[in-house]
Amino acid sequence: MDFVFLVFSSFSLLADPVNLTYVILGFVIGTIFAAIPGLTATLAMALLLPLTYTLSVETALMACASIYMAGMCGGSITAITINIPGAPSSMMTALDGFPMQQKGKGALALGHAALGSMFGGAVGALLLIAVAPFVAELSLLVKTTGKFSLLAFALIVVVIAQRGRIPQAGLAACIGLMLATVGLDAMEPITRFTYGYSSLTAGIDLMPVIIGTFAIAEVLTQASARIDISAAAAAAANKVKIRRRDFLPPLSEIRKIGFGCYFKSCLIGYFVGTLPGAGGSMGSFLAYTETVRNSSEPETFGKGNPQGIAASESANNAVCGGAMVPMLTFGIPGDPITAIMLGVLVINGIQPGPQLMADQAGLIAPMLAALLFSAVVLIPLTLWLIGPYFIKIVSVRKDVLYAVIALLAVVGSFVATYSTFQMFMALGMGVLAFYLRRNGFPVITMLLGYILGPNLEEFLRRSLALSNGDPTTFVTNPDSLFFVALTLVFVYFLVIRKPANTPGTAKAK
């Protein structure tokens, strides 16, 4: 209860013009990046990560929270207006949003998306505020062997969640684990895999890995793409005329969608978010298919049913709150954005884990307050003020856009480390990530392998040292056995037993 009070008292920090400016600026930037196809809020946060060095910890985390929330709702803009989801989590929104746009109801569809995003973001943030302290207390029961099994469970779930690409995901995760072993040994004063380069003694810095994996790889991907949607997007943008009052969904349609649909979708999104690597796309897909399954008019979905938009957007924004639970209490990112937020915490000397809520709750509470503020205030306010201009974003010239991104990425990686070697390492990681993406390897598993690798190795070696090398310790300790069993359950349902087709499956492909 003390933590809940602390979070709501942290709203006073938003009265500080500096904090409020960075929160609003972060939300606008996150919205723009999420709305432009090919860009994501993950890329926005990766580019802005070096700026966190010049900000206080509270301000940096509040800005990151607003970018996160904006990234989830911003992808619906182009998903609805030109049928190109700006973010993977908005894929299901396009199924009903674009047909409404074709019927001349694009503004109404954007209004439904904003309402669902606001509801989902608020419920996800409130559940996070209420549940996180209890999860932190429960996490104190997890000992060394259990921590290894938990991290192994997280990595395995991330890999098997990549449907149809499990071998590629597994190999990418192994590459990440290998990169994490470069430098000084975690338990002995020896260097590993430095090949005589003194610059590698300290290992590969987190910043070049993040910037290279997301920013530089994205620039290379877009530069190699043969199709440029700028002209088509600009043409579509010029045809659409939107008035601000057109964004307001009528009460009759909100009642028809029903509170149950909103709330159920929020719960689905929140609990999917707590699973490492699941992400907003899985949450919105499950919520959408569940809504179709329970609907009395399933044949209307995919043809402009606002209920589909509400379910998808409520779920993917509720994922924000869910994904922060494992990140804050166990140091396990729930998705790519929380992986970068984990980097912000580590860079500022904050170690996520069971003691975080007790020892440094004052630093975390403002971030959660900003998350809730972004959902309840900034989502509707942004749509109302600049909604009519949203679709103009997609007509920005791509050559200018990606040239600026490349410059910011290179300069940012140098400023973050003041190391020319690490700057070239960022370029090298970008090339590696580019070729991995080009050949169907999900780079998020590589990044999570790199982030989880040091702790995974440390807990493995400690567990074996405590048990005198006996590997059965992982199935004889109750906390470890729980996560081993949970891993087997996930492997069975996601790999061995294929999920049955749902009404929305065919549409999602």
Image (spheres, grey):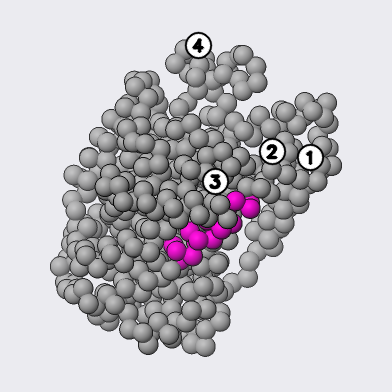
Residue labelled with disc 1: 474
Label whose residue precedes the other's in the sequence (1 or 4) = 4
**Which residue is identified by label 4?**
196
Query: Mark 4 or mark 2, which has the lower sequence index?
Result: 2
Pick whichever, 220 or 259, lies toward us.
259
Q: CA distance from mark 3 to mark 4?
A: 35 Å
Q: Between label 2 and label 3, give the one nearer the viewer.
A: 3
CA gap, disc 4 and disc 2: 31 Å
- Tell me which residue sits at (31%, 56%) in the image: 31
- What residue does disc 3 label? 327
- Gap in Å between the C-alphas at discs 2 and 3? 16 Å
The secondary element bearing badge 4 is classed as loop
The N terminus appears in which quarter of the rendering? bottom right
Q: Amino acid at mark 3?
A: Met
Instruction: Name the mark nearer the viewer: 3 or 4.
Output: 3
Ranked by sequence position, the earlier of labels 2 and 1 is: 2
Earlier-in-chain disc, 2 versus 3:
2
Q: Give 461 or 347, whichever is nearer the viewer.
A: 347
3D distance between C-alphas at marks 2 and 1:
9 Å
Q: Quadrant of residue 237?
A: bottom left
Q: Main secondary structure of the magenta part?
A: helix
Kindly identify which residue carries mark 2. 148
- Labelled pair 2, 1 in contact (Cβ < 8 Å): yes
Q: Position of residue 20 (x, y in %)?
A: 30, 50
The correct choice, above or below, for 293 with respect to 508 in the image is below
SS of the residue under disc 1: helix
Q: CA distance from mark 1 to mark 4?
A: 37 Å
Q: Residues within 10 Å of mark 1 (few under 14, many from 20)?
A: many
